[in-house]
Amino acid sequence: MIQVAIADDHELIRKGLHMLIEVRTDMHVLFEASSYQELVKKLHEHQPNILILDLNLGDSNGLHTIENITQSYPSLPILILSAYPENVYALRAFKSGASGYLNKSAVSEELITAILTVTEGRRYISQGCEEIFPLGTEIKKEERDLGEILSKRELEVLRLIAEGKTPKEIAETMDLSPKTVSTYRTRIMEKLELESTNQLQRFAYEMLS
C-alpha cells in the first residue's frame, strides 16, 4: 500500500487529489497539509511513501521547501505539482531534490502514473515534455538559462520584479518609460506562459531570489 501525503494550500485541489488516489486499492492518503508548517509537523508524526507538493504553499518558498524536506527526509520522493511551464521551472525543482514534476493541467490524466513511477525510484515529468529531458534518462546537470528564453532587457526586468520593485520603480531604475516596462512584462509573461501578474511575481521570486 502506497501511503501518500498531500501538501497544497487550496482545499479543492487537495480534495480532488484525495479522490483520485482513494479510488485505488493500492494507495491511501495518509495525511493532507495546507501549509509548510503543518507539513513539517505531520511529517514528523507520519511516514508517507511519497509527498505530493504544491510549489506555492504560501508560507514558504517552493524551491527552499523541496531542499528542506529533502535534507530532513532524504529517502522521501517528492512529486511537484505546479502551474508553471516545465521548460523553465522543472529542472530547478529536480535540482532542488524533487523526484517528479507534474503540471496541474495534467493531474487527472497522469497523477497515478506519476505516483507509481516516482515510488519505484524513477523520475517523472508531465507527458509531452520529453524534449526537456527524456523519460528514463538522467537529467542533465546544466540548467537551461533563462537567458535563452528572455532578452537581456527582459531578464533585467524579471530580476527587478524578484526584488519586489514596482513597475514605476523598475522604469526609474532602468531609465525607461512605464509603458516600455509594461511591454517587457507582457512579453515575459507570454514567453514563460504565465497567465497573471501574481504568477509572474511568484515566478520571479522563486527563480531569482
Image: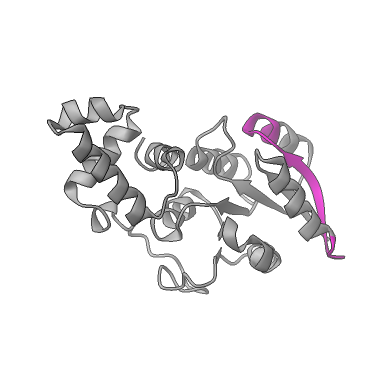
Q: Position of residue 76 (x, y in %)?
A: 65, 51
Q: Residue at x 78, y 59 (%)?
A: 21
Query: Which quadrant of the figure has residue 17?
Result: bottom right
Q: Which residues are magenta?
A: 23-40
Quadrant housing the N terminus: bottom right
Magenta span includes 166: no
Q: Is residue 124 left or right of residue 109?
A: left
| Pick the front one: 189 or 49 | 189
Q: Residue at x 66, y 51 (%)?
A: 52
Quadrant housing the C terminus: top left
| Pick the front one: 124 or 49 | 124
Q: How was this image coloured?
A: one colour
Q: Residue at x 77, y 60 (%)?
A: 20
Q: Is residue 8 left or right of residue 92?
A: right
Magenta span includes 29: yes
- How many numbered circles are shown? 0
Residue 7 shows up from this direction: yes
Residue sticking out furthest to the right: 25
Q: Position of residue 156 (x, y in %)?
A: 22, 40
Q: Is residue 169 left or right of residue 122?
A: left
Q: Residue at x 27, y 57 (%)?
A: 149
Q: Position of residue 3 (x, y in %)?
A: 79, 54
Residue 114 shows up from this direction: no
| Pick the front one: 67 or 176 | 176
Residue sticking out furthest to the left: 175
Q: Position of residue 62 (x, y in %)?
A: 51, 40
Relative height, residue 6 to residue 107 (above, below): above
